[in-house]
Amino acid sequence: QVQLVESGGGLVQPGGSLRLSCAASRLTFTFRSYDMGWYRQAPGKQRELVARITSFSSTNYVDSVKDRFTISRDNAKNTVYLQMNSLKPEDTAVYYCNARIPRSANDYWGQGTQVTVSS
């Protein structure tokens, strides 16, 4: 069974930075075959896509995090990262890692990591 393990969450003051990591293991296909994404879900809200990096390393971001967050991947380490700068209270949420191969049943989630932005 595919495993995605997130780390790097925590409590940070507004304007601060965090770097999330997601390590993948037990993959059916090579890590580089997967589109990797970071989603988040705040209390009482739907889960939303924050950032995605495709197998070709093309990236896209939700408008609210553009110019503040950066997604990257290290295929040699089977890991995807989310660098989050200039954090705001509205970034507070549980952040989930996702691995998928488009148009297939290969779609997996991590357990989530809490990010809290508060003074």
Image: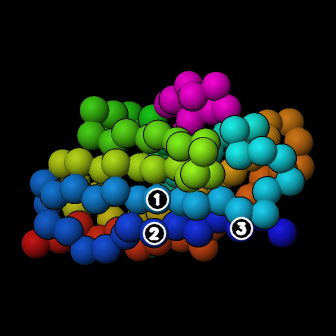
Looking at the rendering, which quadrant does residue 110 occupy?
bottom right
The three-letter amino acid code for the residue at tag 3 is Gln
Any mark on residue 1, and which?
none
Q: Is residue 59 magenta?
A: yes
Q: Which residues are magenta?
A: 52-60
Residue in the picture at 41% in, 49% down: 82
Of pointers 3 and 1, the one earlier in the residue sequence: 3
Horizontal placement of 17 versus 103: left or right? Answer: left
Residue 30 on image: x %, y %: 78, 44
> Would you say the residues marked 1 and 2 are in contact, meaning their CB atoms lie under 8 Å apart?
yes
Horizontal placement of 113 versus 110: left or right? Answer: left
Q: Secondary structure at mark 2?
A: strand
> Would you say the residues marked 2 and 3 are in contact, meaning their CB atoms lie under 8 Å apart?
no
Residue 118 on image: x %, y %: 17, 71
Any mark on residue 7, and which?
2
Viewer-nearest residue: 41 or 79: 79
Residue 50 on image: x %, y %: 47, 46
Of pointers 1 and 2, the one earlier in the residue sequence: 2
Residue in the picture at 28% in, 59% down: 18
Q: Vertical placement of 57 versus 98: above or below?
A: above
The three-letter amino acid code for the residue at tag 1 is Ser
Q: CA distance from mark 3 to mark 1?
A: 13 Å
The three-letter amino acid code for the residue at tag 2 is Ser
Any mark on residue 3, and which?
3
* Pointer 1 residue: 21
Residue in the picture at 28% in, 32% down: 67
